[in-house]
Image: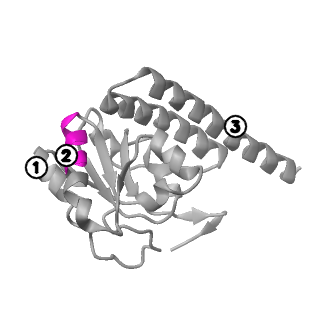
């Protein structure tokens, strides 16, 4: 019975991903303005991630999100522990995520990220950083929330790595707030973790 329920959950997740991509394809066909398209993609992503959390049986206890209602054009900055972080954050921050070109080049995951309205930075080559900062500033000025993980990698959370500071310039140039957040997983697979 347990194997059957796991199969149903996995099937629901893959079906959800396919329906998400279909919805996003329609948005990309209909909405021509890039930033409006990303805004619609971000809103839909928020609903689909709620479904994903439900299907994966992930319970989220969000503290302080009531203070974020109606805030648009903020640069959200937080720690990055797992790929699950985006699912956990999306229902509360309707915004686009900044990720690397390596993710963009990953089959299927790259297409999902593009359709979801992610912004991409090239960590292997710093020559394009001014264009990337400009793109994030433009998103903020359009009123989009943008989420970054300034450590530029996921960690186990035991220590803080050096922050990649250049992307903060986008919020400074736009005159928009920087909003910190912290992700902390309490239980994984029913086991308490520290």
Circles 3 and 2, Cβ within 8 Å, touching? The answer is: no
Q: Nearer the viewer, mark 3 or mark 2?
A: 2
List the residue tagged with mark 2: 137
Is 115 left, or right, of 77 in this rendering? Answer: right
Please say if the residues under marks 3 and 1 sit with CB atoms less than 8 Å apart.
no
x and y, in percent, of residue 92 in the image: 40, 42
In the image, what residue occupies the spot 48% across and 32% down? Answer: 44
The reply to whether the magenta stretch includes residue 139 is: yes
Q: Classify mark 2: helix, strand or loop.
A: helix
Q: Sequence order check: which comes first, mark 2 or mark 1?
A: 2
Q: What stretch of residues is rendered in magenta?
A: 134-142
Crowding around mark 2 (Cα neighbors within 10 Å: few <14, some 14 to 19, many 20+) is many
How many angstroms separate mark 3 from mark 1 (CA)? Answer: 41 Å
Tell me if residue 127 comes above or below residue 61 in the rendering.
below
Cβ atoms under marks 2 and 1 closer than 8 Å: yes
Residue pictured at 50% horizontal, 74% vertical: 194
Q: Residues within 10 Å of mark 3 (few under 14, many from 20)?
A: few
Q: Position of residue 170 (x, y in %)?
A: 18, 51
């Amino acid at each position: 019975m347990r194997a059957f329920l796991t199969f149903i959950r996995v099937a629901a997740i893959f079906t959800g991903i396919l329906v998400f991509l279909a919805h996003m394809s329609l948005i990309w066909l209909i909405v021509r303005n890039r930033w409006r398209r990303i805004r619609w993609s971000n809103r839909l992503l928020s609903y689909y991630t709620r479904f994903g959390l439900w299907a994966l049986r992930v319970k989220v206890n969000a503290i302080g999100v009531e203070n974020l209602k109606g805030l648009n054009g903020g640069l959200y900055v937080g720690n990055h522990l797992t790929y699950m972080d985006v699912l956990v954050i999306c229902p509360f921050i309707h915004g686009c995520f900044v990720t690397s070109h390596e993710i963009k080049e990953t089959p299927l995951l790259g297409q999902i990220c593009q359709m979801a309205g992610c912004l991409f930075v090239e960590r292997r080559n710093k020559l394009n950083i001014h264009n990337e900062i400009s793109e994030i500033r433009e998103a903020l000025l359009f009123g989009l929330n943008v989420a970054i993980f300034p450590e530029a990698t996921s960690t186990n959370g035991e220590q803080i790595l050096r922050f990649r500071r250049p992307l903060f310039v986008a919020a400074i140039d736009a005159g928009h707030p920087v909003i910190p957040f912290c992700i902390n997983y309490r239980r994984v697979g029913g086991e308490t973790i520290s």
